[in-house]
Image: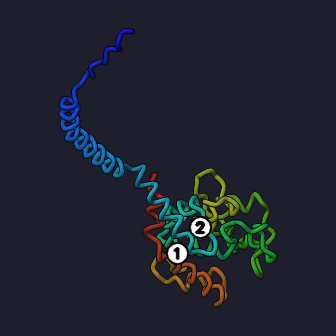
């Protein structure tokens, strides 16, 4: 029987060791390049957006009801037009309809929409049917008509330029609230007077300003997180 011939290794141990030694600096270089590439990727907007979303979620844990992200954009836009702090608009929205989560957006007294306007305040107290608490006998078409609002001196606003000033449209409602509050001093810093005129109740003023101060503590962070993709 023939003896099996032992095959010689393709690479000698010395050659293998030499190759390993040569590969070490290459591996280190690849690792360093990958590390710096990852750090560079982290500066891209997608990572910034993810970090801001995480911060936004953490801030929301401080509130009894989360502020809907899409509403913050509306509050900020209204602030830019009327000078009323967006956090004050958020506080009103929280108190009036719990960020529009109430079962009905019509109060027992007749206030309507996201920000709870009495029809006479929205359309204008010069309307011939307005008296008392301000419910009036105002038709749906009159309530939403910018021309009627101009005629009777109301606070309703067509925020999105669709030809309708609708207290049940979130943009129109928030802009209308900002319009009202600005006329009573909120844009110049007299928040207490403005809030009191919105609802003649000391308890109401206390509640709104409580949430205003709470939201204002996170004003910059919330705006940055929500408006990052603009």
Residue found 67% across the figure and 69% down from its top: 122
Please tell me the numbered disc located at residue 67: 2
5, above or below 139, in the image: above
State if disc 1 and disc 2 touch (CB < 8 Å).
Answer: yes
Judged left or right of residue 229, residue 91 is: right
The mark tally for this picture is 2
In the structure shown, which secondary structural element does the residue marked by tag 1 occupy?
helix
Please tell me the numbered disc located at residue 155: none
Viewer-proximal residue among 113 and 5: 5
Q: To which residue does mark 1 refer?
A: 215
Q: Position of residue 138 (x, y in %)?
A: 78, 66
Q: Position of residue 188 (x, y in %)?
A: 45, 79
Judged left or right of residue 225, residue 106 is: right
Q: Residue 205 is drawn in which quadrant?
A: bottom right
Is residue 179 visible to the viewer in this orientation of the structure?
no
Is residue 79 visible to the viewer in this orientation of the structure?
yes
């Amino acid at each position: 029987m023939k003896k099996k011939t032992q095959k010689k290794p393709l690479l000698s141990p010395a050659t293998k060791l030499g190759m390993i030694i040569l590969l070490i600096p290459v591996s280190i270089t690849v690792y360093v390049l990958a590390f710096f590439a990852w750090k560079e990727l982290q500066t891209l907007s997608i990572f910034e957006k993810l970090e801001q979303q995480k911060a936004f979620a953490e801030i929301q844990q401080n509130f009894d009801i989360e502020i809907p992200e899409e509403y913050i954009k509306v509050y900020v836009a209204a602030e830019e037009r009327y000078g009323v702090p967006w956090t004050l608009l958020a506080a009103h929205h929280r108190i009036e309809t719990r960020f529009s989560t109430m079962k009905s957006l019509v109060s027992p007294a007749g206030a309507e929409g996201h920000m709870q306007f009495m029809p006479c305040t929205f359309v204008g107290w010069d309307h011939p049917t307005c008296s008392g608490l301000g419910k009036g006998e105002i038709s749906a078409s009159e309530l939403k008509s910018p021309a009627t609002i101009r005629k009777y001196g109301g606070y309703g606003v067509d925020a999105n330029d669709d030809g309708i000033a609708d207290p049940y449209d979130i943009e129109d409602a928030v802009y209308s609230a900002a319009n009202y509050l600005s006329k009573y001093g909120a844009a110049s810093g007299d928040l207490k007077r403005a809030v009191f005129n919105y609802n003649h109740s000391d308890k109401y003023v206390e509640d709104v300003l409580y949430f205003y101060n709470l939201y204002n503590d996170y004003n910059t962070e919330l705006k940055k997180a929500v408006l990052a993709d603009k």
